[in-house]
Image: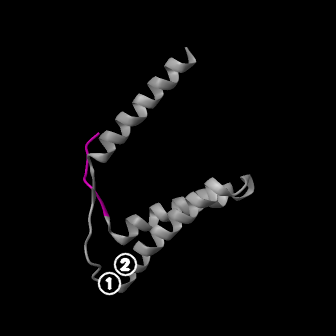
Amino acid sequence: MRLLLKLIGLALLLVGIYFLGQNIIFTTQTAPYWWRDISAAGSVLAVTSGVVALLFFNRSAGGLGWVLVGLGILLVFVSGGVVLRPTSL
């Protein structure tokens, strides 16, 4: 029964990611302002550092890893490389 619930949860997670992915557009535009390049490069560095901290450091650095991953995701939206299409609920 536990395995069935985990499989159903995984299926629902994948369906949710699929529907969310239908409304996200990733762009590769040249930055009109100099500060947009900094946030784009910073997002790659922050996500990479966060994943490395989560995978290779002990539990005490896990919080820092999640903060870096969150910062990287935030910087992706600040850099303008991700456009969210409006959706109706």
Residue drawn at x 39%, y 82% as measured from the top left: 35
**Placement of the N terminus among the 4 image quadrants:** top right
Q: Which mark is residue 33?
A: 1
In the image, the segment drawn in magenta is 82-89
Residue drawn at x 37%, y 41% as measured from the top left: 17
Label 1–label 2 contact, CB within 8 A: yes
Helix, strand or loop: magenta stretch: loop
Dot 1 alpha-carbon crowd within 10 angstroms: few under 14, some 14 to 19, many 20 or more: few
- 16 relative to 32, above or below: above
Residue occupying the far front of the picture: 56
35 or 60: nearer the viewer: 60
- 9 relative to 66, above or below: above
Residue 65 at what x, y percent from top left? 61, 59
Q: How many marks?
A: 2
Residue drawn at x 40%, y 30% as measured from the top left: 12
| SS class, disc 2 | helix
